[in-house]
Image (tube, rainbow, N blue to C red):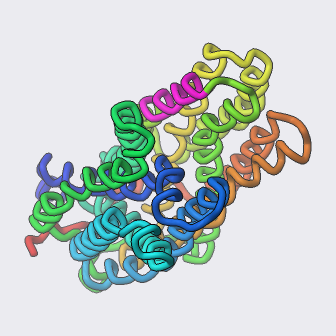
């Protein structure tokens, strides 16, 4: 099949894949915005601090099951297809989010409440871990070769948009409801907002074509680099991108605890972060299609490497909204450019026959190890060193490690037209 004959996705189908990814991340991350209220409702403890710790520990459980979901559902996607895998992950997420939102309080059923909450949180993590590999593989394989970077950028733009939406809904509910109402049912409403969209997105996903091409049917360019080499490069690349992302996400907390900036001003940086990263994720995909994956990823990495420490120094020196917002925007812009280009490079380096499973597993392991620990380590570094800019040094080292991973991979943009030829078959 020549490129001119390649079937293309409709806007409705692209929206289904992208919106589904956004909704899964919305459901997973909304928990963190309501950790205090969930702790009050579902967990035992004599003090608010104890309840919050239980709630945050349960949030972390979701990271533990993500690698398992990435591996198992990714392998399923490589054997049975991207479409059934994406339907499966979305169905599991729907079950988990409804179940968690309807879990009776600790006051009603005692210790069964936190046990049920942990089980549903584990299911959430499993589903989200299984979403990334098939979703990204589908976007790469369904896209025209000259637009793969942009299609993959939708994966990350929708993730960041989901953070923005979760924060906005949290702000709306907290403004409208009393603290008691927010603890009793407000946090449940936030989850159910996402759950209402699940059936419609599943219906649209069922209409998708299938992009998986088995190796015996594909004209596949075999990578000159070994799979283990590519996997190691991907882990290094994703370690840098993950730590960088979670460091930038940490700025809201950093501003309050390390710099003494008031909460309202600090939360303004969250809005800036969401808007800028969402926008520049799309710019990254567009640039990667025009100039190559590695040039965009390397330029963004170099600028981040140079900008991280000065940006934190300026925030720490001036401790005002102008410094906070401008430096948040700068770091968010560069992270927005880095991630889609680098992940497109890694994804295209993987053969189609193992793409979803390998990508999902490496991505989920990276998130579980580096994403789950980044903010804890950075706060620990601040406590141990007494320096508020300690997170910048950690981020700089991580970005340097990520650059090694980028250099280990060959440029894939120029090979896109010669790679495996996807077929979109109605299933």
Seen from the viewer's position, the closer of residues 177 and 143 is: 177
Left or right position of 162 against 52: left
Q: Quadrant of residue 99?
A: bottom left
* Residue 410 included in the magenta stretch of the image: no
Q: Quadrant of the C terminus?
A: bottom left
Left or right position of 143 against 285: left
Q: Is residue 63 visible?
A: yes
Question: Is 64 above or below relative to 346?
Answer: below
Return the x and y of residue 226 as percentages of the image width and height: 57, 76
Residue at x 66%, y 54% (from the top left corner): 49
Q: Quadrant of the N terminus?
A: bottom left
Question: Is 48 above or below relative to 249?
Answer: below
Seen from the viewer's position, the closer of residues 15 and 103 is: 103
Q: Which residues are magenta?
A: 263-275
Residue extending furthest right?
385
Q: Quadrant of residue 393?
A: top right
Q: Is residue 282 visible?
A: no
Return the x and y of residue 164 as percentages of the image width and height: 40, 38
Residue at x 18%, y 70% (from the top left corner): 210
Return the x and y of residue 350 as percentages of the image width and height: 46, 69
Question: Is 187 above or below relative to 248?
Answer: below
Residue at x 34%, y 47% (from the top left corner): 154
Seen from the viewer's position, the closer of residues 305 and 198 is: 198
* Residue 268 included in the magenta stretch of the image: yes
Seen from the viewer's position, the closer of residues 381 and 421 is: 381
Return the x and y of residue 97 as percentages of the image width and height: 33, 64
Residue at x 72%, y 50% (from the top left corner): 398
């Amino acid at each position: 099949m020549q490129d001119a004959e390649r079937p293309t996705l409709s806007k409705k189908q692209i929206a289904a894949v992208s919106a589904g990814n956004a909704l899964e991340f919305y459901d997973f991350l909304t928990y963190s915005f309501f950790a205090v209220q969930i702790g009050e409702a579902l967990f035992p403890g004599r003090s608010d601090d104890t309840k919050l710790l239980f709630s945050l520990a349960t949030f972390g459980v979701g990271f533990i099951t993500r690698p398992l979901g990435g591996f198992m559902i990714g392998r399923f996607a490589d054997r049975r297809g991207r479409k059934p895998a994406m339907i499966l992950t979305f169905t599991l997420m729907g079950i988990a989010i409804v179940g968690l939102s309807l879990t009776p309080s600790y006051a009603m059923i005692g210790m069964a409440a936190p046990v049920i909450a942990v089980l549903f949180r584990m299911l959430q993590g499993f589903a989200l871990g299984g979403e990334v590999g098939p979703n990204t593989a589908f976007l790469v394989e369904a896209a025209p070769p000259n637009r793969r970077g942009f299609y993959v950028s939708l994966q990350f733009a929708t993730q960041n948009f989901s953070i923005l939406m979760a924060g906005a809904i949290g702000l709306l509910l907290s403004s409208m409801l009393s603290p008691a109402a927010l603890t009793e049912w407000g946090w449940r409403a936030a989850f159910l907002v996402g759950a209402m969209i699940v059936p419609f997105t599943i219906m649209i996903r069922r209409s998708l074509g299938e992009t998986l091409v088995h190796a015996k049917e594909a004209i596949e360019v075999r990578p000159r680099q070994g799979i283990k080499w590519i996997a190691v490069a991907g882990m290094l690349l994703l370690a840098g991108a993950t730590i960088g992302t979670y460091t930038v996400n940490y700025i809201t907390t950093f501003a309050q605890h390390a710099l003494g900036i008031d909460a309202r001003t600090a939360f303004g940086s969250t809005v800036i972060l969401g808007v800028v990263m969402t926008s520049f994720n799309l710019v990254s995909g567009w640039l990667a299609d025009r100039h190559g994956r590695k040039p965009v990823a390397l330029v963004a990495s170099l600028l981040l490497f140079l900008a991280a420490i000065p940006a934190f120094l300026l925030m720490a020196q001036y401790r005002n909204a102008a410094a906070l917002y401008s430096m948040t925007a700068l770091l968010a812009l560069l992270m927005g450019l880095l991630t889609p280009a680098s992940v497109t490079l890694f994804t295209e380096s993987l053969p189609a026959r193992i793409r979803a499973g390998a990508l999902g597993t490496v991505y989920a392991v990276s998130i579980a190890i580096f994403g789950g620990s980044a903010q804890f380590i950075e706060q620990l570094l601040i406590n141990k060193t007494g320096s508020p800019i300690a997170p910048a040094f950690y981020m700089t080292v991580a970005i340097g490690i990520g650059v090694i991973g980028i250099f280990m991979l060959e440029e894939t943009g120029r090979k896109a037209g010669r790679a495996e030829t996807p077929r979109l078959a109605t299933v």
